[in-house]
Amino acid sequence: MRRDIFQAIADPTRRAILTLIAWQAMTPNAIAENFNSSRQAVSKHLRILSECELIKQEHQGREIYYSLEVDKMKEVDVWLAQFRAIWESKFNQLDELLEKMKTQAEK
Amino acid sequence: MRRDIFQAIADPTRRAILTLIAWQAMTPNAIAENFNSSRQAVSKHLRILSECELIKQEHQGREIYYSLEVDKMKEVDVWLAQFRAIWESKFNQLDELLEKMKTQAEK
DNA sequence: ATTTTGTGAAACCAAATGATTGCACATATA
DNA sequence: TATATGTGCAATCATTTGGTTTCACAAAAT
């Protein structure tokens, strides 16, 4: 059972959940109202997101508020950095320039 | 059969492939040498990466060179932007400051 | 012309995934 | 105290996934 952030954000429902609770904590029921699948299905998604620490819980009476663990999202950013280095590189920008000149020359 | 970039980068082997060919195009055989799985397994990964246009092919005789389609990687970056907005926000930085003050006060 | 090499595709299989249903249990509310 | 509510967990199931094996075929080498 793989359980890392990349596997976690692979599912579109989980990505939607992350967006939903990004700015404000929500209970499982409130979250589930936004989807077509059952409350239990959403609950399983929340467990997966919790297990890889992309979200955190805060108990309040019998309600549980889930919120984003924004620092964990940075790990995706860190992985992405290696590619950002490429698309921001001079070489790549030169490529684009040459490509642009070529297509314009064809007109 | 879902086929989007997030599902594509969910697999660790595929992420490794992307890193491997990021700066220099490689043939399937050359790529496969870096992994324990079979050439055919790598070939399937390449197909998935191709289908969601994260990589591109360039035929050269009977060899095929695969290289990164770096612009496609930007889509992950676009999605991540909404969370970057949070971790760069004043609110979040204030949270961290308060947290820091609290832990220091405990010492 | 025959053999070797580089590659993709199909068939098959075990394991993982995402969903549903049914249940358990703690906390509110009547 | 009895009932309703909010939630997690286990069992089950169809589908997807990632891998291997086998085959096909075109391009290069002999």
Image (cartoon, coloured by chain):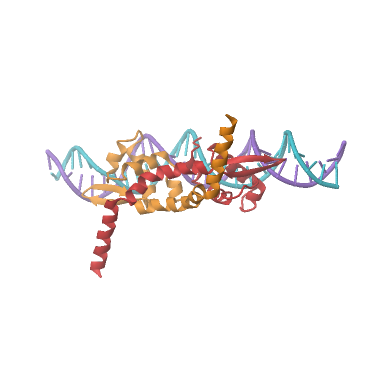
Chain colours: A red, B orange, C cyan, D purple
Q: Residue at x 63, y 49 (%)?
A: A31
Residue closest to the eye, B96 or A4: B96
Vertical side of B1 occupied by D8: above or below: above
Please state the horizontal and vertical placement of residue B96, each as a whole percent of the image.
54, 41
Please state the horizontal and vertical placement of residue A89, each as a whole percent of the image.
30, 50
Residue closest to the eye, C8 or C10: C8
Please state the horizontal and vertical placement of residue C12, each as a whole percent of the image.
43, 39
Residue A6 seen in render: no
Question: Residue B104 occupies which quadrant of the picture?
Answer: top right
Question: Residue B101 occupies which quadrant of the picture?
Answer: top right
Residue A87 seen in render: yes
Q: Residue at x 38, y 53 (%)?
A: B72
Q: Residue pushed farthest top? A: B107
**Which of the image's four quarters has the C terminus of chain B?**
top right
Question: Residue C23 occupies which quadrant of the picture?
Answer: top right
Q: Is residue C3 left or right of residue B38?
A: left
Q: Residue at x 55, y 37 (%)?
A: B100
Tally the marks.
0
